[in-house]
Structure formats: structure tokens, C-alpha cells
């Protein structure tokens, strides 16, 4: 009855009925690797509902497509790596990064069993998803730390992880970068795990949360509640193993309990809380984008690509300390 009178009042006042319907928000993520867990946990652990958000998770493969959907208005939030939003801004796109739940490369360098040391990658073919993203940057920065000239290795765009595993099995590739649970399958195949790239000195915002600037200006409270849900989901995933395993059991294309547990062990140590963005990692991303930008340069001002004002606000209000005490 109350709702009926509200609707009648809305009609008399000329107010749109849409004000009485809860907005639905489309939230994209980029695939089925274990590092997508913080987005899955928002829904699976009930955190979206807790903070009053009605959200639909949408899988859009790859950062480039995820950014395109965000710019087109097909989605409201996107979990992507930092190179995509930076590239979009360089091209005039209305997009900004507001947080990040993973600031390290979640990859391992996997090689044929006869390749035992990074130095033995010289002259070899290394498979990546494609040029211009996290895979390429991870390999480039790893080569730099290993004192291997970039030109000494051939990078080959080779598709998704499953396709690259086939390439490794057929020896079409000498090495590639994979993340759990694919690294566990690679080890089962007898391939050699040369290095875990999370151990590199270099940081990189792998799980960056991006929105349109115009959306944030008009819906700052929605962005704030989203980051509250995202932060608590990340914290619960890290600190409550049973919840993390439940998320992976539902979402990973993997039914082996041992693989699921190993994947959880790896990522529960890697996620960032609070969801601060590594500024050094942003600069690595900007350098990669600059290589393909007109004139070989991008604006060096981080504020063109990054707005942590909502995270700052939550920090001032004591939100992160409060949920960590629960």
C-alpha cells in the first residue's frame, strides 16, 4: 500500500518512476584466471547486496574489450589491467582508475624442461596473449631484471592460456607466461617453472578498477559503495580460507580440490588491501603505452589516469581499519 501511494505521488509530482527502481550495475572482469577472484567474491559473498548495490558480473575477455565496453556505456565498472585505461585516456577516452586489488604480476615464466635458467631464453620464442598488455610488460620487465636484452627474445602473440599450453606441448613455443591454475597444469605436463613474476621488483596494477569519469562525477556515492564492497570482498577472501575456496570452487573451470587450494594459497598472499594503486606500476604501464603512442610519449601526470580520492575518503573515515577489526 505504501509503495502504491509513493507511485501515485510520483505521478502527481511529475517524478520519473525509475527513481523507485534500484539501478542495476554491470561489472566486467576479463577471464577465468584465479586473479579475478576479488570481483567474483563481491557477488558470491554477498558484499554487493550488503552495500546496497544491484550488480551483474559480465565476463569480457581481455583488457582492451573490457575498456571498450566501459567507454561505450555497456558496463559501469571494469576490472582490467592498467594499460587499457591509460591507452584510452591517451586517445581521449573518458575513463579513470580508482583502485586496485592486485599490484603484482600474477604470472610465472614457464619453459620447456631443457630450459633451466632465465639466461637460456636468449634466442627463444616466448608466447604472450598479445602485444600492449600485462603479458608483454611482464616479460619485458623480467628480461630487464635478468639483464637479457629485449631483442634477444622473440615475443609471439599466441592467444589465451589454454592455447599457449597447447603451443608448449607441441614445442611451437619455448616459453610462456601463465597464472594459477594453468601453472599447476604446466608443472603436471613436465614443464619447468623458471620464475614467479610476483617475485620481481617491478609492480603493476593487474586488477585495476576503472570507471568513466563522467559516471563518477554523477554517481560518486555509487563508486564509494562499490569500493566498500570490493575492499571487504578482498579482505574476506584473504582472511577466510573457507570463503576463498568456495568462490574458486564455484568460479574456476577446475574441479580438482588440490588445484583449487594451491590457487587460493598463491592469490591470498598476492592481493592488496587497502586497494591502493602502485604508482610505480602505473609508470611502468605508461612507458609501455608510450611505445605505441604518437610521438612515443604520454602525459606523465598520474592524475590524468588515476583518481584515488574515494579510497582516500574511506581511509580518512577509518573504513579499512573498521572492517579489518571485525
Image (spheres, helix red, strand yellow):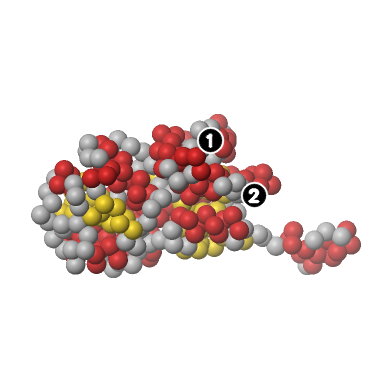
Looking at the image, which residue sits at the far left? 114
**Residue marked by disc 2:** 215
Q: How far apart are labels 1 and 2 at the CA level? A: 23 Å
> Can you tell which mark lies on residue 299?
1
Location of residue 83 in the rendering, given as x and y in whole percent from the top left corner: 45, 46
Nearest the eye: 263 or 112: 112
In the rendered structure, which disc, 1 or 2, sits on the residue that comes first in sequence? 2
Label 1, residues with CA under 10 Å away: few <14, some 14-19, many ≥20: few
Location of residue 82 in the rendering, given as x and y in whole percent from the top left corner: 46, 45
Please give left or right for residue 1 compared with residue 132 in the image. Answer: right
Quadrant of the frame with the C terminus: top left
> Can you tell which mark lies on residue 260?
none
Nearest the eye: 8 or 155: 155
Label 2, residues with CA under 10 Å away: few <14, some 14-19, many ≥20: some
Nearest the eye: 144 or 31: 144
Q: Residue at x 35, y 43 (%)?
A: 104
Residue 32 seen from this side = yes
| Residue 148 quadrant | top left
Location of residue 99 in the rendering, given as x and y in whole percent from the top left corner: 49, 42
Count of numbered tags = 2
Q: Nearer the viewer, mark 1 or mark 2?
A: 1
Which element is circle 2 on?
A: helix
Amino acid at each position: 500500500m505504501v509503495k502504491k501511494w509513493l507511485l501515485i505521488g510520483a505521478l502527481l509530482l511529475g517524478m520519473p518512476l525509475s527513481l523507485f527502481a534500484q539501478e542495476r550495475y554491470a561489472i566486467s572482469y576479463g577471464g577465468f584466471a584465479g586473479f579475478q577472484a576479488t570481483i567474483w567474491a563481491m557477488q558470491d559473498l554477498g558484499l554487493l547486496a550488503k552495500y546496497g548495490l544491484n550488480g551483474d558480473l559480465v565476463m569480457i575477455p581481455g583488457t582492451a574489450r573490457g575498456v571498450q565496453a566501459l567507454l561505450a556505456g555497456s558496463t559501469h565498472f571494469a576490472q582490467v589491467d592498467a594499460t587499457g585505461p591509460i591507452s584510452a585516456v591517451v586517445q581521449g577516452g573518458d575513463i579513470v582508475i580508482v583502485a586496485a586489488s592486485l599490484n603484482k604480476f600474477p604470472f610465472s615464466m614457464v619453459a620447456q624442461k631443457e630450459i633451466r635458467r632465465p639466461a637460456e631464453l636468449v634466442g627463444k620464442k616466448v608466447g604472450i596473449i598479445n602485444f600492449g598488455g600485462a603479458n608483454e610488460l611482464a616479460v619485458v620487465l623480467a628480461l630487464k631484471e635478468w639483464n637479457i636484452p629485449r631483442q634477444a627474445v622473440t615475443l609471439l602473440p599466441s592467444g589465451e592460456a589454454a592455447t599457449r599450453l597447447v603451443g608448449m606441448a607441441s614445442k611451437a613455443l619455448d616459453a610462456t607466461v601463465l597464472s594459477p591454475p594453468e601453472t599447476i597444469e604446466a608443472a603436471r605436463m613436465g614443464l619447468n617453472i623458471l620464475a614467479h613474476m610476483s617475485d620481481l621488483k617491478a609492480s603493476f596494477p593487474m586488477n585495476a578498477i576503472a570507471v568513466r569519469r563522467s559516471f563518477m562525477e554523477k554517481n560518486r556515492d555509487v563508486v564509494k559503495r562499490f569500493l566498500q564492497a570490493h575492499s571487504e570482498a578482498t579482505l574476506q577472501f584473504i582472511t577466510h580460507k573457507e570463503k576463498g575456496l568456495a568462490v574458486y570452487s564455484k568460479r574456476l573451470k577446475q574441479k580438482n580440490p588440490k588445484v583449487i587450494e594451491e590457487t587460493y594459497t598463491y592469490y591470498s598472499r598476492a592481493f592488496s588491501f587497502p586497494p591502493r594503486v602502485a604508482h610505480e606500476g602505473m609508470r611502468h604501464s605508461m612507458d609501455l603505452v608510450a611505445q605505441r603512442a604518437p610521438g612515443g610519449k604520454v602525459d606523465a601526470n598520474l592524475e590524468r589516469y588515476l583518481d584515488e580520492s574515494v579510497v582516500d575518503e574511506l581511509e580518512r573515515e577509518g573504513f579499512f581499519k573498521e572492517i579489518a577489526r571485525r
